[in-house]
């Protein structure tokens, strides 16, 4: 098997007509079609019947991140509109949660639409009414960097957190391939029913199909579930522009995992562990590599991040998932940590050896994307068979589309 650095992204493409990209979700979340792939065999059902395809006592892992209203529109005195898209916090904040709780002022890495009309030092202002109060939000252009701008956002009343400001003043950022403006209904439908922690600029879309009734049917079959948090960045939509993967810079994303979740994962290794969404999968597999650092004595509170190629290039001895997770738990106890908060840049592509999971529930992804590489890593060249089947059988693609259960 080639090192994933040598993979050509041109080998991971397929024709995707615009008509097959779902612009709106179905009226009922769990009515979406479900493609089931198991050892080369493909069958079709709906999400409502998911419990029929998962053995009892399996563990489903969900990402409970919440999409924030990251698009802020400011009107200049001349009438022109400047859009500020809040990507992720400035590096001065220890993690995304702390940045979201800042009061009065915050620094954020942003994309800016109409940046050529905004001079450094010029302050934009937006006034809005929220819960009977007037909020004044100001944006100041601080610095231009490669790929983003540093913007200082400040507001009154200063007692409000940045999360509250975004809820009041911002709009839900629909993916760039949904060619319409966000509507009121998107505030609910581009959010999972279990979303909890503010921080994402894109939904973990595999979870959009789940309803309370579906959770109940899984519970009746003794299918357990638990949660991790990975805050999805705009990089999830970033196409791979490099011909070979060694020239692609994988986006890093914040993960936040409790010690009790890692204990649940450790106890579940002898059964089936299915991640709901590529973000949950990246989080769970990253835990193995963080645990491997703990087992080799090199893990430090200040350097827990997993880099892009680490999973392919480590020189220490391979260890099993139970040894890795046990070492991670011991390390967390020794460092009095109840939660693990760090960044992962892990790139999962053909050649990757899965350490913890054996199933994935996911939507259908863009051609030439890192998410399609992840699917190919899991089911090999049969990814083409799956995507051809979905195309021939009128499945709906991308964020608001249908999905699959891949063993």
Image: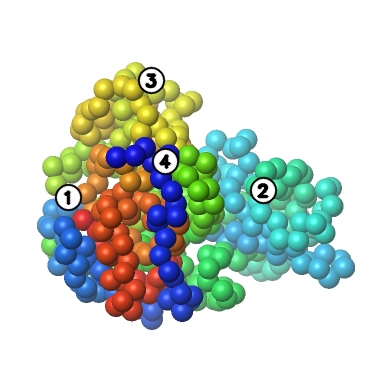
76 left or right, relative to 390: right
> Alpha carbon of mark 1 to alpha carbon of mark 2: how far?
41 Å
Q: Earlier in the sequence, mark 1 or mark 2?
A: 2
Residue at the limit of the structure toward the top, as seen here: 297
> Alpha carbon of mark 2 to alpha carbon of mark 4: how far?
29 Å
Q: Quadrant of the N terminus?
A: top left
Looking at the image, residue 203 lies above or below residue 119: below
Q: Residues within 10 Å of mark 2 (few under 14, many from 20)?
A: some
Q: Quadrant of residue 277?
A: bottom left
Residues under numbered marks 2 and 4 in contact, where contact means CB atoms less than 8 Å apart? no
Looking at the image, residue 329 lies above or below residue 128: above
Q: Quadrant of residue 99?
A: top right
> Which residue is disc 1 drawn over?
272
Q: Earlier in the sequence, mark 3 or mark 1?
A: 1
Q: Earlier in the sequence, mark 3 or mark 4?
A: 4
Residue sitting nearer the eye, 123 or 12: 12
* Residue for point 21% across, 38% down: 266
Q: Earlier in the sequence, mark 1 or mark 4?
A: 4
Q: Secondary structure at mark 1?
A: loop
In the rendering, at what x and y percent does residue 293 appear? 35, 25
> Which residue is disc 3 drawn over?
298
Is residue 52 something that shows in the picture? yes
In the rendering, at what x and y percent does residue 302 appear? 48, 25
Q: Secondary structure at mark 2?
A: strand
In the rendering, at what x and y percent does residue 291 appear? 31, 30
């Amino acid at each position: 098997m080639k090192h994933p650095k040598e993979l050509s992204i041109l080998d991971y493409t397929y024709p995707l007509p615009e008509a097959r990209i779902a612009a709106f979700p179905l009226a009922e979340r769990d009515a979406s079609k479900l493609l089931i792939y198991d050892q080369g065999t493909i069958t079709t059902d709906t999400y409502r019947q998911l419990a029929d395809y998962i053995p009892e006592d399996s563990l489903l892992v969900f990402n409970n991140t919440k999409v924030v209203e990251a698009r802020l529109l400011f009107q200049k005195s001349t009438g022109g509109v400047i859009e500020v898209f809040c990507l992720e916090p400035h590096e001065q904040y220890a993690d995304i949660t702390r940045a979201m709780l800042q009061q009065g002022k915050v620094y954020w890495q942003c994309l800016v639409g109409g940046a050529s009309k905004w001079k450094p030092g010029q302050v934009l202002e937006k006034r809005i009414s929220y819960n009977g109060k007037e909020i004044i939000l100001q944006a100041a252009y601080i610095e231009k960097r490669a790929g983003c701008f540093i913007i200082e956002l400040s507001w009154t009343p200063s007692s409000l957190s940045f999360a509250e400001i975004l809820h009041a003043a911002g709009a839900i950022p629909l993916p760039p391939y949904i060619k319409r403006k966000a509507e009121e209904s998107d505030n609910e439908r581009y959010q999972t029913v279990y979303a909890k922690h503010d921080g994402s600029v894109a939904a973990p879309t595999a979870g959009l199909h789940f309803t309370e009734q579906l959770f109940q049917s899984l519970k009746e079959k003794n299918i357990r579930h638990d949660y991790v948090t990975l805050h999805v960045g705009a990089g999830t939509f970033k196409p791979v522009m490099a011909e070979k993967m060694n020239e692609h810079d994988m986006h890093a994303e914040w993960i936040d995992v409790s010690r009790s979740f890692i204990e649940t994962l450790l106890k579940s290794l002898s059964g089936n562990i299915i991640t709901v969404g590529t973000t949950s999968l990246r989080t769970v597999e990253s835990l193995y590599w963080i645990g491997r650092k703990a087992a080799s004595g090199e893990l430090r509170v200040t350097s827990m991040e997993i880099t892009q190629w680490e999973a392919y290039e480590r020189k220490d001895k391979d260890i099993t998932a139970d040894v890795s997770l046990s070492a991670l738990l011991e390390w967390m106890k020794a460092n009095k940590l109840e939660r693990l908060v760090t960044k992962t840049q892990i790139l999962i592509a053909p050649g990757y050896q899965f350490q913890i999971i054996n199933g994935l529930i996911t939507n259908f992804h863009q051609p030439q994307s890192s998410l399609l590489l992840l699917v190919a890593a899991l089911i090999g060249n049969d990814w083409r068979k799956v995507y051809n089947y979905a195309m021939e059988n009128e499945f709906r693609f991308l964020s608001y589309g249908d999905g699959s259960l891949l063993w």
